[in-house]
Image: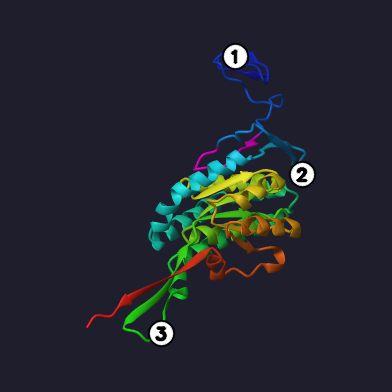
């Protein structure tokens, strides 16, 4: 029992006379439903399907199970955002990526707590969050440098100059490591958008809570809607559509299933889809070559006047 301003007694969980309810041990917790992230918004899956995920503390949360229609909507959003994102100055993209790191820095404790709920020890969770922040800052620094590193002036014998520069591929699909965590997600995602591409990310159910929390950080940062889209769900349902969608320009496979990778290669062969093998055995250390995995090289000839 608690005492109101007038001295009257109010039981825990009863209304306080003003339409509110006093908090207490008898209240029901508000369980979070993890939605999809498309075009800067968090719609529910059009299929209406959800999958339960049991966290280490026994809490059960609902994860949206994305459908083929959700994937098509995500690709449309990514295509709308691609021209604007790729045409921004490298310096501006760097500022925007750094803003993601700033916001994640301010929510470190929340992400550590979320990782602990995924059966990660507290000490490892803290290290993982800090490494993820450092990775974002690292690629923010590469935004205005990788073009200088990989561009070239080519020797020619004619009366013209010959230049080669990297350009973004376009829309990149990312199939995350089902046994990975926040660091693996950030390490695969950041090189895509650093290079001016937009991303459509499939998130395994086991990683959905941390991925959608990251999407909330991205939404409140300066990243334009549609640059990053996240689709939690069953991989077996969505993988064929990642491989066969004609408006996805490249797919990064960061999973661990050799049969899935071969299926992607087979589907992509029909329309010359670039498949990037980023399975654990193929992973490199962080660096600009991750950015170049989703870049095209454009060569230009310029005549020399007399």
Residue shown at 50%/60% (left/top)? 169
CA gap between label 1 and label 3 equals 90 Å
Residue shown at 39%/84% (left/top)? 156
Q: Secondary structure at mark 3?
A: loop
What residue is disc 2 on?
Answer: 56
Residue shown at 62%/18% (left/top)? 3
Of marks 3 and 2, which one's residue comes earlier in the chain?
Answer: 2
What residue is disc 1 on?
Answer: 7
Residue 63: % across, % down: 67, 38
Q: Which mark is residue 155?
A: 3
Residue 50: % across, % down: 69, 35
Indicate whether residue 104 is drawn in magenta: no
Boundaries of the magenta span: 32-42
**Toward the viewer: 282 or 265?**
265
CA gap between label 2 and label 1 equals 43 Å
**Toward the viewer: 203 or 295?**
295
Q: Is residue 84 left or right of residue 159?
A: right
């Amino acid at each position: 029992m608690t005492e109101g301003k007038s001295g009257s007694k109010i039981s825990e969980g009863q209304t306080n006379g003003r339409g509110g309810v006093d908090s207490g041990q008898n209240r029901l917790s508000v369980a979070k439903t993890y939605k999809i992230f498309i075009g800067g918004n968090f719609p529910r899956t059009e299929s209406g399907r959800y999958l339960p995920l049991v966290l280490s503390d026994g809490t059960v949360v609902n994860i949206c199970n994305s459908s083929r229609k959700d994937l098509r909507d995500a690709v449309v959003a990514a295509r709308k955002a691609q021209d604007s994102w790729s045409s921004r100055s490298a310096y501006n993209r760097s500022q925007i990526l750094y803003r993601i790191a700033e916001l994640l820095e301010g929510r470190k404790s929340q992400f550590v707590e979320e990782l602990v709920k995924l059966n990660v020890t507290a000490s490892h969770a803290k290290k993982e969050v800090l490494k993820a922040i450092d990775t974002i800052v690292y690629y923010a620094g590469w935004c205005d440098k990788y073009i200088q590193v990989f561009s070239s002036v080519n020797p020619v014998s004619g009366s013209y100059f010959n230049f080669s520069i990297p350009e973004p591929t376009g829309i990149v699909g990312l199939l995350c490591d089902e046994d990975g965590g926040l660091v693996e997600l950030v390490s695969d995602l950041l090189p895509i958008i650093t290079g001016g591409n937009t991303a459509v990310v499939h998130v395994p159910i086991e990683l959905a809570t941390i991925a959608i929390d990251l999407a909330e950080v991205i939404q409140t940062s300066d990243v334009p809607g549609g640059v990053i889209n996240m689709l939690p769900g069953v991989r077996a349902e969505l993988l064929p559509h990642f491989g066969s969608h004609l408006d996805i320009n490249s797919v990064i496979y960061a999973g661990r299933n050799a049969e899935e990778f071969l299926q992607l290669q087979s589907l992509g062969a029909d329309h010359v889809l670039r498949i990037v093998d980023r399975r654990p055995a193929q992973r490199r250390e962080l660096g600009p070559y991750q950015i170049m995995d989703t870049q095209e090289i454009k060569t230009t000839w310029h005549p020399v006047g007399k």
